[in-house]
Amino acid sequence: MRAAARHSAAGALAAALLLTTLAAAPAGSASDPFGTSRAPGAAAELRGAAVAAARARQAGIDFGTCSSDQDVPGTMECGAVSVPLDYADPDGRQITLSVSRVRATQRDPHNSKHKVPRQGALVFNPGGPGASGFYFPLVGLLPEWKRIGAAYDLVGYAPRGVGRSAPLSCQDPKRFFKGPSQAPTHPSESYKRERIAQAKAYARGCAERAGDALRHYHSLNNARDLDVLRAALGERRLTFMGASYGTYFGALYATLFPSHVRRMVFDSAVDPDPERIWYRNNLAQSAAFEGRWADLREWIAKHDKVYGLGDTPEEVLRSYERARARLAAEPAGGKVGPGQLQGAFLQAGYYDDYWPLRAQALSEYLKGDPQLLIDIAGPVRDAAGEAENAGAVYTAVECNDAPWPTDWRVWDRDNTRLARVAPFETWDNAWTNLPCAFWLAPRQQPLDVRTGPGELPPVLILAAERDAAAPYDGALELHRRLSGSVLVTERDAGSHGVAGGPNRCVNAYFEAYLLEGRVPGRRAACEGRAEPSPSR
């Protein structure tokens, strides 16, 4: 989903992440020990995962000092784990995943004389696809995470394809940032033809740069990698927290390896319905962002005395459209056009904390000072390599994960209809995903995420009702599919990623679950967080 490549719940969280033997393998019935009824054709890969996990358990992870270019405090250790590129051939080509750790302090943050029992490793994935959790362990420095960091080794890693973990690339990073750019809400036929050509070229670039390896970057392998990491850490059962896309392959893990689960937190859950992976989920996301865009405009209107952009959402929209028109004619600083403006306000759809600065930048630009808008919306050239890599992984995983429509007329019909009622993100999201229509690697069939009574320990699902990046219906669907799961809802709130943030009620459920294994029945709710204060 669009949350994927560029924005993950890691930002909200950190303000700033196998088997011992073949016989212990994926849960299933005695007649179906490899779960092949759930994942047809996957028996070889699951056997390969068992082999790789047993090997990883024996090898462990040699954690040591991080390299100087990783620029981290001395408390964080770095290491690596090898996984098969192709789980059907576990003795073939291996790739290396970068892993990080901060050991459990075992110190009570409220009483330094009290020693806290260590509960093992907490592994985190921030989403994407394409986001790295490598720096997640540093979240333990934040007050909201001190109790968790006392009990758990905080473990992050870069998933396959990301960062130093067998990195993927689909184009020269020097060509990645195309700005200033347009972002028509109702594109012309000539503009559509231009974007189709770009999507085809991008798909070819992915295939040419990655070669045959491209087919092996997908969510099922991310789930298998997670089990190898569990084994390498010496954990009999996994304690895992996934945010955004991390909830999807975490749910795949729970389905493939339910007996390997200790505790799991799914924060801002993606809808795992195989029929929605990923084309329909992206349409749903575009529709949901229209609601968040309305929330933001209503908030700006409420603070018209501060920003002067209009005292109704409609007037705020007119101010935004004036800025779009002006930027189309003359990009700010030669860098920021309508596309960059839309991207900056899309980020505000993810996190309430971004609202004041975006509103202030728009206000100052319309009053004649473009500098703040340039600062927050202009491309950061030094980050081009990281951004290109994240985009490549996002595209490869989503395109590989499932069948996509290959007929442009389907995309055109669906997005044209949706843009009539949800113009804010619809076409931008479509262009991001359009390479999947022309993808050259084989597609996976999505796994039917589902566990029966007693198969899985209770897992905790956290969701905000108005989250646009991971619409709330996805949390309800995941809750239905994982028997015994518990859903905690942040009411009338829309920030993407709710654990470890400002909501004390949510954090109380989060800590009770991870620290004590306590859950509040099947469902619970918390009042939403306070709205941000306007900048002055």
Image: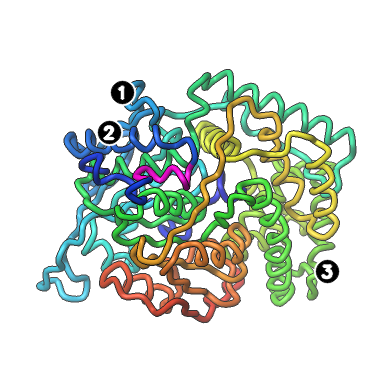
Give amino acid for label 2: Val
For image coordinates 64% across by 38% down, the residue present is: 403
Nearest-to-viewer mark from 1 and 3: 1
Asked if disc 2 and disc 1 are in contact, CB closer than 8 Å, the reply is: yes
Circle 3 packing at 10 Å, graded few (<14), some (14-19), many (20+), is: some
Give amino acid for label 3: Glu
Q: Earlier in the sequence, mark 3 or mark 2?
A: 2
Magenta residue span = 32-39
Vertical arrangement, residue 528 with respect to residue 369, above or below = below
Place of residue 482 in the rendered image (x, y in percent of width and height, measured from the top left): 46, 63
Closer to the camera in the image, 341 or 10: 10
Vertical arrangement, residue 296 with respect to residue 198, above or below = below
Side of 293 relative to 446 (left or right): right
- The kind of secondary structure element at disc 2 is helix
Q: Determine which residue is flagged by label 2.
A: 51
Q: Earlier in the sequence, mark 2 or mark 1?
A: 2
The residue lying furthest to the front in this view is 31
Find residue 315 and name its label. 3
Place of residue 410 in the rendered image (x, y in percent of width and height, measured from the top left): 80, 41
Query: Which quadrant is the C terminus positioned in?
Result: bottom right
For image coordinates 45% across by 75% down, the residue present is: 503
The CA distance from mark 1 to mark 3 is 62 Å
Residue 159 visible in this rendered orientation of the protein: yes
- The kind of secondary structure element at disc 1 is loop
Residue 353 visible in this rendered orientation of the protein: no
Q: Determine which residue is flagged by label 1.
A: 91
Reply yes or no: does residue 217 show up in magenta.
no
Give amino acid for label 1: Asp
The CA distance from mark 2 to mark 1 is 9 Å
